[in-house]
Amino acid sequence: MRDLALGADLACINTATLGFREPLEITARRVAEAGFGFITPWRQEVDELHPERAAQVIRDTGLKVGGYCRTEYFTADDGAGRAAAVESNRRAVEVAAILGAPFVVAVVGGLAPNARDLRGCREQILEGLEALKPTLKATGVAIALEPLHPFYAADRSLLNTVEQARRWCERLDPHGEGLFGIAVDAYHVWWDPDLEASLERASDRIMALHVCDWMRQTGDPLLDRGMMGDGVIELARLREAVESHGFEGPVEIEIFSKENWWKRPPQEVLRICRERMNTVV
Amino acid sequence: MRDLALGADLACINTATLGFREPLEITARRVAEAGFGFITPWRQEVDELHPERAAQVIRDTGLKVGGYCRTEYFTADDGAGRAAAVESNRRAVEVAAILGAPFVVAVVGGLAPNARDLRGCREQILEGLEALKPTLKATGVAIALEPLHPFYAADRSLLNTVEQARRWCERLDPHGEGLFGIAVDAYHVWWDPDLEASLERASDRIMALHVCDWMRQTGDPLLDRGMMGDGVIELARLREAVESHGFEGPVEIEIFSKENWWKRPPQEVLRICRERMNTVV
């Protein structure tokens, strides 16, 4: 298991952790100063008509780009809605290439607004992902499929386990060309009784490892995520499992916490993130 | 697929659906009058020192007992806590026998209050269940293991998928003596990408089918469950899958709904339950 305390090269901040309260230029500077080597920005922070500006802002801090968040939902009640999502997600891939991000994180979408057909909606997602392949090949940017906690199945993601993501990778990228991989987020997968076996089977597909913590009394499953060490997830065990199968990327901190961490000064949040990265993760 | 509209013999009410607002005697009478043939009571409604009284109350209405809810959590921070849970759960099995319930529903417990060790806590649960076997054999009552939605892994149940429940049955009851089975609740399992295959593999272990609905915008994951047809679950498809593998028990309605259904008159709730059983489930 790698020693995260050694350096910035293993540590990434997802900008969601700071609650999008400041422009990317300031956020990136803070992240670099706090001892992180990577940043993963969100689309809302980037002018996608002029992405070279955000690329320059990040380069100026010396940071590398961990990934780019995130796809729009591929599910929709009509074909026009699905086509618009693919179009937007193609643009995300192109922007990621300009930013120097190795992948776009995919949050794939739940049931379409008026749908109940799980299988049909999962097929919509797979078709949408398939449609991105020419752009992925042209840019060299991958899609990191992120399984979300089953709590979000109805409204955010019908991709809910590592094993399911692995199967989707097999279908979308059968020859392992690196077009599709998996973003493993501790918050979403920690409960899975099949997790260790799933990670082993998926080892050559894992592109990202996200960490935060699951609070025992979770008020809001979307925006009440915890700082590493404050909740119940055995983060070191998870990281060991992922790294033992060959994962070499940075560990990315992503904390959605409307009532707690998003209210604290960004410098304080980053300082504690850095400490916990060394002591808990 | 069976025609649920045909009669009471296929329809069960779990008393949680009515919010525990009236004594069992009144609840049982209402359930029988609404056209249900089975009732599944909770321990808080039964005087476990004199369970023959509750048994008589139910018998007087002509209802049969679908199951008995539920075990206390098997996980605890010390051995005394775990022993107390086993003792209480033994009593639940004995009472179930007196009530004429074929099984006690097991909600197994999440992480012990001060624990993070998933594997250790799962072992605590399996040891606790194992300790019930003499009582199960003596009474002829089974334990129906209920996988709970992964949202509850930290604080209510480390048993979260049908496949995991099947594996536990294999371990606890390797010769299929009927000591341990599975209660499949639509609310908890609907999202599972492996559900259909899991149900097929577990077909000879399924003891109960619970229904309600998952609301697209779920406020409170514990107490905001929906009436069948108001949410997103494909209930008829689920029932067809379970019945196609041989399930012959009643379909049990269990709705925890603090802000909606628990505020409506019990007769109205039961009438709508009966209608939806015929039209949606």
Image (cartoon, coloured by chain):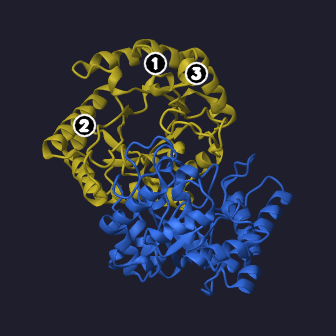
Chain colours: A yellow, B blue
Left/right of residue B176 with respect to residue A185 in the rendered view = right
Report whether mark 2 lies on the same chain as mark 1: yes
Mark 1 or mark 2, which is nearer the start of the sequence?
Answer: 1
Q: Which amino acid does label 3 sit on?
A: Leu
- Secondary structure at badge 2 equals helix
Q: Alpha-carbon neighbours of circle 2 within 10 Å: few (<14), some, or many (≥20)?
A: many
Say which element carries label 3. Answer: helix
Mark-to-mark CA distance, 3 and 2? 30 Å
Front residue of this view, candidates A10 and B208? B208
Residue A89 is labelled as 2
Q: Is residue A269 above or below residue B85?
A: above
- Residue B191, x across and y down, in percent: 41, 57
Q: State the quadrant of the N terminus of chain A.
A: top right
Pick whichever, B65 or A18, lies toward us.
Answer: B65
- Residue on which the image places disc 1: A62
Look at 47% across and 36% down and name the residue there: A222
Q: Report how far apart the C-alphas of labels 2 and 1 lie in the structure.
A: 27 Å
Q: Residue drawn at (63%, 38%), measured in percent from left and top?
A: A281
Single out the mark in the foreground, 2 or 1: 2
Q: Where is residue A182 in the image (x, y as percent from the top left)?
A: 41, 48
Q: Hey, which residue is sitting farthest right in the picture?
A: B80
Q: Which residue lies furthest to the left in this view?
A: A80
Dot 3, how many residues are within 10 Å of its Cα: few (below 14), some (14-19), or many (20+)? Answer: many
Residue A270 numbered mark, or none: 3
> Residue under mark 1: which chain is it in?
A
- Which residue type does callout 2 highlight? Asn
Residue A260 visible from this viewpoint: yes
The chain to which mark 2 is attached is: A
Q: Is residue B163 visible?
A: no
